[in-house]
Structure formats: C-alpha cells, structure tokens
Image (tube, helix red, strand yellow):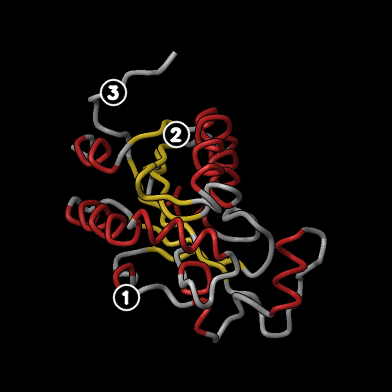
Amino acid sequence: MTEAPSTEPLTAPALVISECQRGILDPDRSVSGGLAAHAASRGIVPRIARLAGEFRSRGLPVVHCTIAHRQDQAGMVANSYLGKVALRERSMTEGTRDVEIPPELAPHPSDLVSNRATGITAFYGTELDAMLRLQRVRTLVLTGVSTNVALPGLAFEAVNRGYHVVVAEDCTAGASPEAHTFLLENQLGVAARIRSAEQIRARLG
C-alpha cells in the first residue's frame, strides 16, 4: 500500500548532498560510467542546486557529504569492490580534480561539509552526526548519489541514530535506471519516505 504524501511541514530538516563530485559525476572521470550517465540524464545537479537554495533561503542547513582519500591511502582496505578500485586507480584522492564539487553545488559559507577518507558510508569515521545534532536536525532530506550504495547506507545509519529520512527521488541517481528503481522500491523505501523535490519544497514551511 502506498503512503499518501503528508502536507505537514518537515520537522527540523537538513538537506544532505551525497558525493556530488567530479570523480563520480563527470563521464570522462567517473569511477562508474553508468552512474555518471544516469545522473546526467536526470539532470540532478541543477535540481539539487535549486532545492539547496530553498533550504538556505529558509535558514535550514545544507550538508555536503564528500569523499577524499588520503594521498598515502592510509586506512584504505581492499575488502570490497569499491575499495579495490579506489586503491588500484587512486581515484577520489585529496588534492585531485576527482574530489572537486561542481560549481553549481559549491558549498556556501553557511553550509556544512563532512568529508571521509575511508569507508563507504557518510557517517563512518566522520563528524556528521555531531554536526547534525548541534544544528538540532531531526529530518534528513537525501540527494545525490548513489542509490546503489551511499544513499541506502546513509539512510539506514540515520534511522539507527533516530533521524527521520526523506529521499528527494528526482535529485538522486544510481548505476542504471533499473537499479535505481529497484533499490528505491525494495530497499530505500523501507527506511525513508520517497518524495519529489517539489513535494519536499512544499513542506519546508
């Protein structure tokens, strides 16, 4: 049974922009060509930028969750496919173009940036939870990539920490359209409410 979207304002929301960096989104640099293509075809970057503007205009937090591995690769382990690729290709390394955020999504002075050097989810080894609690955030609105790994991991870990989670579906992308749809319907939908950017904008109060 599909839950009808609520019209009540979101409770203490923050916008989370996940891993929107050149080494993931640029087709000529991406560690996943399928993900870069899906993100481009959906036009998620300008849509996220507009939603971020709405949050800022209301004084609501905008948080960038990024990856930047250390130059010496300290702490990285080849215990997953992603780990093996990152080690072999030296992708998403600090100081390289891979880790740059597209200009349209560049952090504003009021934004928060949570970077991780190891692991595959945003809460691991970072101050993200502390940042959110100090801002009195209770609801996370997730955008960015990917619906395969980072966003499900972020959603489940957020729920474990007591946050409410909403996914701005048209501001996200996965490794393929088929994977994106499957994971939204069978995984992310279990932990989060799935909404459009317009539906979320209407609930910002």
Residue 44 lies left or right of residue 129; in this view the side is: left
Residue 59 lies left or right of residue 80; in this view the side is: left
Point out the image quarter for the C terminus. top left
* Residue 103 disc label: 1
CA–CA distance in space, label 1 to label 3 = 33 Å
Crowding near the residue tagged with mark 1, few <14, some 14–19, many ≥20 C-alpha atoms within 10 Å: few
Which x, y percent locates residue 148?
58, 48
Q: Nearer the viewer, residue 59 or 40?
A: 40
CA–CA distance in space, label 2 to label 1 = 29 Å
Residue positioned most to the top? 1
- Callout 2 amino acid: His
Residue at 47 percent of width and 70 percent of height: 21
| Residue with the mark numbered 3 | 6
| Residue with the mark numbered 2 | 164
Which x, y percent locates residue 109?
29, 71
CA–CA distance in space, label 3 to label 2 = 14 Å
Query: Considering only order in the chain, which callout, 3 or 1, is on the residue closer to the N terminus?
Result: 3
Residue at 51 percent of width and 53 percent of height: 130
Residue 197 lies left or right of residue 152; in this view the side is: left
Q: Is residue 14 above or below residue 138?
A: below
Dot 2: element = strand
- Callout 3 amino acid: Ser
